[in-house]
Structures are given as C-alpha cells and as structure tokens.
Image (cartoon, helix red, strand yellow):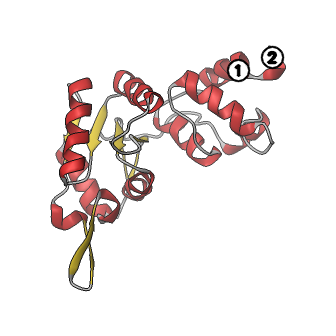
Amino acid sequence: MERVRLQEAVVVEGRDDEATVLRAVDAAVLSTHGWGMSEEALENIENAYERQGIVILTDPDHAGEEIRRRLSERFPEAKQAYLSRPDAEKRKDGRIADIGVENAPPEAIRDALLAAKAQVRETAPEHPVTPADLISLGLAGSPQSNALRQAVGRELGIGSCNAKAFCRRLSAFGITREELLAAWRRNSPDNR
C-alpha cells in the first residue's frame, strides 16, 4: 500500500493512534491525549486548524465520540473521518478486547481519511528540514536538545516531541528552514 501525503493535520486521541495513522499516511498527526486535553494540546491543534486544516479521527466508541464533539465545537470547520467498529476492533479469544484507531489496518485509516475529503499533497515540501539540520542547531543530539525543541515547537505551534517526530512535523506542517531558524534564534540560549 502506498502512503498518501495529506495537507491537513490528523487529530487522534493518543500516541498509539498517532503511530498507527503514520503507518497509513504521511501527515502531521496530533494527539488530544485522551479526554483530558491539555491547553498545550489544544493550542497545537488550533495552530494546525488555522495553518492547514485538521481532520478529526477518533475511536468509534462513546469516549471517542465525546472527544470528537468537543473538538468539533471548538473547530467547526474540521473535517470528520470515521472508522467502522469492525475495523477498529481488537479481538482476543473470539471477544472484543479493545476498540480504537490503534487497532485499525492502514488501508482502513487511509480510506477513512480520503472519504473525509482530506486533501492529498502531490509533492513533498521543497527543502525539508533534515535530521542533520536539527543536530547542527542543537535541536537533537545534545543534553539541552529536548528543552530547546520544546521551546521552538511551542513557538511554531507543533508541540513537543522527540527529534524524529519533530522533523516529521516540521515537514508535515510545511515549516521552512527559514521559519525554523527564526524560531531557533529567538529561543536558543546562545542567542539571548
């Protein structure tokens, strides 16, 4: 299966959902971290909503529908992607052991996102930020990297994450090297 590159960010409930969605599509994926959405998570989602649009993909259960309802109230123009319960079920000993996005096959996730009319990007961003760029700026590979990534990620509205996810989010959000450098200059302890 070929991974589709999406313009919009995909909003899911948790980290396992993020990993599963990234096996299906190339996109910015943001997590609400469940029902208790932090203000930082909501700010990151709002940034994506304003910058490129979002597609909401929650679990096909009561909690997932409540999270979807809350997000839809705050982000009324968000696109809505739905998985069927059978696609999201994990079975053990013939019984349903779990229901969630993290259990769905990549094809079902891709199909749900495309059915929601998620925009497909035909080309990769020009001059994407590379892991080498992160290392040269101290955003990866040093003891201070995590704190600096958090500060720069907060300013760019992509949240805090490890270096690999940070690089992927920069690309998925269409953030240029110039934008990254400007945010880095404002947040690097060496530049203050």
Regarding residue 75, the answer to whether it shows in the image is no
Q: In the image, 171: left or right of 98?
A: right
**Compared with residue 110, is residue 93 higher up or lower down, i.e. above or below?**
below
In this view, the residue farthest toward the right is 190
Query: Where's residue 191, x and y in %?
Result: 80, 16
Q: Which element is circle 1 on? A: helix
Q: Quadrant of the C terminus?
A: top right
The image quarter in which residue 135 lies:
top right
Q: In the image, 13: left or right of 174?
A: left
Query: Where's residue 182, x and y in %?
Result: 66, 17
- Residue at image coords 28%, 54%: 110
Q: Which residue is mark 2?
A: 191
Q: Which residue is mark 1?
A: 187
**Compared with residue 36, is residue 103 higher up or lower down, i.e. above or below?**
below
In this view, the residue farthest toward the bottom is 93
- Residue at image coords 45%, 52%: 15
The image quarter in which residue 143 lies:
top right
- Residue at image coords 34%, 26%: 49
Q: Which element is circle 2 on? A: helix
Q: Residues within 10 Å of mark 1 (few under 14, many from 20)?
A: some
Looking at the rendered structure, the kind of residue marked 2 is Asn
- Residue at image coords 46%, 38%: 172
Q: Are circles 1 and 2 on residues that touch, CB within 8 Å?
A: yes
Question: Could you give the CA–CA distance between mark 1 and mark 2, rounded to whole angstroms?
Answer: 7 Å
**Compared with residue 170, is residue 156 higher up or lower down, i.e. above or below?**
above
In this view, the residue farthest toward the front is 36
Q: Quadrant of the N terminus?
A: bottom left
The image quarter in which residue 55 lies:
top left
Looking at the rendered structure, the kind of residue marked 1 is Asn
Query: Where's residue 157, x and y in %?
Result: 50, 26
**Compared with residue 77, is residue 118 higher up or lower down, i.e. above or below?**
below
